[in-house]
Amino acid sequence: MSPQIVLPDYGRHNADIEATIKRVDDSSAWKKLDTIMLIPAGKSVPLKTALSWLNMYAPPNNQFFRLPAAASINMEVGEAFSHLIEQILAHPQLSLFKYILTCEHDNIVPPDGLIKLQQRMEANPDFDCISGLYYTKGDGGMPQIWGDPRDPVNNFRPQPPRTGELVECCGTGMGFALWRLEMFKDADLRRPWFKTQTEGGVSTQDLYFWADARKNGYRCGVDCSVLVGHYDMDGKFGPEDYTW
């Protein structure tokens, strides 16, 4: 080997410090983004779903607390979510967290899903909930981007997704959605927040909530860059072991 002049190398990120500052700032990872993940489950969680949850990561050195629904096993899903949030609000430490992440037992999530939703929420402070993009099960499944706020008549007709964009809507699903905890401290919102309605109209627990929340000025949307699977664990909507 011949002698070489070795110049100091201060690293790729320091080579363009302005670009690095913008990247870190845009990521929001330096902010306090403490999040509680709610995991209500029925009788079981499919292995594919559980592994996707385990593979999901959070911003460095932020609190990410997974709250299992041991007390809400076999509860109706809306009842389970409402019960867990009541417990959080009554807890001296958890009530100070910034976000709640709702997941459902049959939604498969991307590894960077949480940090992408946090980034969207931090960039859009007027939004109170942002969901990942997933569809109702079966052939011809519809995107869970429910209702167009530009329509003067409140509705929950599905909107088409827009690749990589944030689409505001009148209601979201709860399979993979990030919520500001502060909204649940609003006494004007009816309780229980989530309820599968079977009398006086029919509604799933998520749209039951948004029918009331929209009246109180709360906004939501779907991040079409966060792609979420909807797992058909019992083969009701097609081949067994199929993800829509």
Image (tube, rainbow, N blue to C red):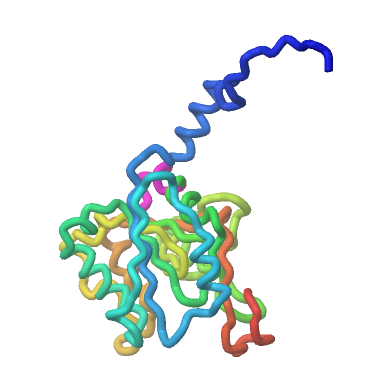
Query: Can the viewer see residue 128?
Result: no
Q: Is residue 98 magenta?
A: no
- For image coordinates 41% across by 84% down, the residue present is 42
- 132 up-or-down from 105: above or below: above
How far from the left and from the top, in percent, is residue 209? 32, 70
- For image coordinates 34% across by 88% down, the residue present is 198
Query: Can the viewer see residue 1?
Result: yes
Q: Is residue 35 left or right of residue 113?
A: left
Q: Quadrant of the C terminus?
A: bottom right
Circle count: 0
- 168 up-or-down from 143: above or below: above
How far from the left and from the top, in percent, is residue 8? 62, 15
Q: Is residue 202 left or right of residue 44?
A: left
Q: Quadrant of residue 179?
A: bottom left
- For image coordinates 56% across by 50% down, the residue present is 165
How far from the left and from the top, in percent, is residue 172? 44, 65
Magenta region: 120-127
How far from the left and from the top, in percent, is residue 194? 30, 74
In-front residue for pair 47/38: 47
- 2 up-or-down from 136: above or below: above
Q: Is residue 114 left or right of residue 110?
A: left
Q: Is residue 121 magenta?
A: yes
- For image coordinates 56% across by 60% down, the residue present is 110
